[in-house]
Image: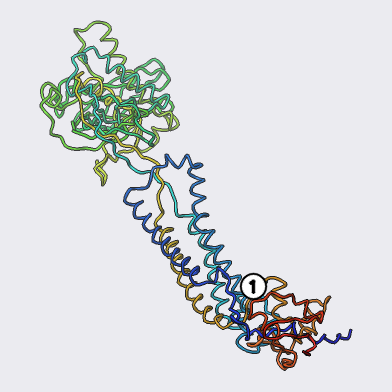
Amino acid sequence: MPLLPSRQPSMTSTMVASERIPPPRTYVPLVLRSWFVVGVAVGMILLAAGVEGALFRSQQRQGWRIDGIQLLGGLNFFKTVVPVVLTVPIAAFWGSVDRDIARYQPYVNMSKGKVPASQSLLLDYTQGRAGTIMSSLSYRHWSVFLSSLVVLACMTLSSLASGLLTTHNTLVIASPVYVQSVKTLGLDPDYVTLEYFNAAAGYSMAAAINNLTDPPFLFKGSWAIAEFKVPSPYGAGLNETVVVPTTAIESAAGCEPADTISLNSAVNIGDNMTITGTWDGCTVTFGANHTGNDGYGVLPLGNCQTHPEAAPFRPVLFWMYSAQLDKADLMFCQPKMELWNVIAEASLVTGQITNVTLVDQSLPPNNISGSPLNGVPYNGVEFDVGGENIYVKARALAIQTGVAGAVYRGADAYGGATAVMQTDDGFLNITENVYVSVIPPVRLNEKGELANADLQTRFLALAAKASYFNDVDSTIQSTAKSYEVRLAVYPLAAHAFSAALVLIAILATINHVTHWRERNQTLLACEPTTIAGIISTASSSRFAASLQGGMNDEEITTALRGRSFGISRRTWQIEAAGDEEDDHLLRRGPPFELKLGKRHSLASFDSGKTVTGPFSPELRTDGKR
């Protein structure tokens, strides 16, 4: 299709921009103005300083309480909104800067001189970030390239900001709390009724069968704590506890397996079998009736020269018999106890002792460490009940049966007595766990706290809690503490986010200075994003005749290929290399009118009507006066 000849521009359609008074000024978008860019960059640096300041305050105060945050929509909502508020405006601003720099680049290129169409009329930096980066590198348009890097860096801000806020449990120490103690060290005179020991034996049996936990003021099976009244919860914190200086008794079983065991089996059911065991220079022989079922029991260790202790304090012998294996297992136990000043922590919710820290053993005189016990506990299964009533005697028998039965039923969790007896240790560990707890090789951890494993309820510790403390009321000054959920600034995210803000601000400022030097001489007076603005830059350009309506991208590229384009410093319009301005068509009428600030319609020039003025009394569009 042949190209139509271009219409010769009229005198009024081309205005000599260099003759304007005042002369045209280079158009600069708002987001590219220096005061705006520098202001945003300084604001980002101040924001980075604010984040670091918030981190310092967070570490100093261990975070902030979240009570008021709940009124703002909840903690999760607040943690989500803050990163958006901090990063979206920053990313949006530098995205706008990048867009205008990209739009500006063709005019910057053409203002420097004639450049190929690929870097002027056909240059398009809106086809995707990857294409923009590659093209800007290829053409060495460093402002566009650096602007793209700034935009990509801004995309990382959201991820970094999302980790700024976190929550953690903070230890909160309350003001001194006064706790009412109701027990103090001392032998309870009612111990002779054996009610406390009988209750302890029954609880041990129930715990072995039903896997019960320790009752209040027992800790890890072996510790009995002087009882005090646990206050009610006082706040909204987690794991509220009261820390009380008090006294405690640690019981130890001191169980060991027999050195030797011999069994004379019964021939028939109903006959007696004889069991003999030796331990630490002592020999014990006893008989038991063979019923065809498993058997168990507990006996005091008497008539032993190496252990001449009195009856209630002598070592005891636990025995177990497996009918299936026709085998006996013997454990000798010699209980011990220690008295301590401790720091006990009790949960305000459950009332249970949660931790015990040892202090020292400097206790005032008492009848537990002194006479009549002298620091030696009752063995709990042997009592002098010769002169007592039938109820006390019945309790003594029930205690022996109950404790031995608890040891036997403790094997149920491991497959039963037969399975346990086939192991290397046999019933030793079960006996220690039921009778009392094992003394660990290392009593304290690095913080001075007990390092025992969590064990089941123990007989001697239960008996000590009831029998070795007297009812005495006193007031103890203690401390209440809790773990409160607080909002805090995460250090790594804060440092990374602050560093990214500063780096982006510096890079963007450098790019702004570079682009400012380039665009300072750009011959563009209006925003090149409207159709009218684009037409004003090429309304009298001759090359426009080679572009016609209906042409696709490929045809336009073909039409402009091989040509170079620039912006005339006289007309501020795009012209192709080789095109010459038609000077005889450039008249001074419109510029003179614009000098006077008169508003005349350009239609009056095209209509041929006479336009008058003080400098040109009769100027026509045909050039005649």
| The quadrant where residue 302 appears | top left
Q: Quadrant of the N terminus?
A: bottom right
Q: Residue tagged by mark 1?
A: 527
Q: Position of residue 384 (x, y in %)?
A: 19, 14
Q: Position of residue 105 (x, y in %)?
A: 61, 78
How are the colours assigned in the image? rainbow
Does 209 sit above or below residue 172? Answer: above
Near mark 1 (Cα within 10 A), the count class, few <14, some 14-19 or many ≥20, is: some
Residue 51 is left or right of residue 116, and the answer is: left
Nearer to me, 405 or 473: 473
Q: Residue furthest top?
A: 389
Nearer to me, 429 or 129: 129
Q: How many marks?
A: 1
Q: Quadrant of the C terminus?
A: bottom right
SS at mark 1? loop
Q: Residue at x 56, y 68 (%)?
A: 30
Q: Can I make out residue 432 in this image?
A: no
Residue 114 is left or right of residue 405, and the answer is: right
Q: Position of residue 124 (x, y in %)?
A: 67, 76
| The quadrant where residue 247 appears | top left
Kind of residue sitting beneath label 1: Glu
Q: Can I make out residue 547 in this image?
A: yes
| The quadrant where residue 537 appears | bottom right
Nearer to me, 232 or 44: 44
Q: Position of residue 32 (x, y in %)?
A: 54, 71
Nearer to me, 257 or 391: 391
Q: Residue at x 54, y 58 (%)?
A: 88
Does 213 sit above or below residue 124? Answer: above
Q: Residue at x 30, y 28 (%)?
A: 218
